[in-house]
Image (tube, rainbow, N blue to C red):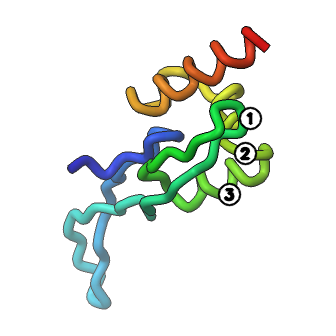
Amino acid sequence: MSRVCELTGKGPMSGNKVSHANNKSRRRFLPNLNDVSLLSDALGQSFKLKISSAALRSVDHRGGLDAFLAKAKDDELSAKALKIKKEIAKVQAAA
């Protein structure tokens, strides 16, 4: 199971763990991922995605999943999110 946000592509970073004696050893900084269900207004159904807390705030700020995916770059999205984006675009083009 990869620790990558499905909407923003945010993944683990690496850095140093620094002790009180200033000894350095490598560590990983993992993104804060949550399993959430987001509702698509255009499709009228909800989708379960594993996204970061920052991405969840961005979805709320942009006005929902449909608006977020419309502005999102395709190379940052997961295969599942890209499929949802294409379905939404198809429905909005037909309307």
Residue 64: numbered disc? 2
Cα distance in 3D space between marks 1 and 3: 13 Å
Q: Are marks 2 and 3 in contact (CB under 8 Å)?
A: no
Cα distance in 3D space between marks 1 and 2: 6 Å
Residue 57: numbered disc? 3
Q: Residue at x 33, y 60 (%)?
A: 15
Q: Between residue 28 and residue 21, name the one nearer to us.
A: 28
**Mark sitting earlier along the chain (1/3):** 3
Q: Secondary structure at mark 2?
A: loop
Q: Between residue 32 and residue 46, name the one nearer to us.
A: 46
Q: Are marks 1 and 2 in contact (CB under 8 Å)?
A: yes
**Side of 16 where 94 appears, left or right:** right
**Side of 92 where 5 appears, left or right:** left
Dot in front, 2 or 3: 2
Quarter of the image with the C terminus is: top right
Badge 1 is on which residue?
A: 67
Kind of residue indicated by mark 2: Gly
Residue 85 image position (x, y, % from top left): 57, 25
Kind of residue indicated by mark 1: Ala
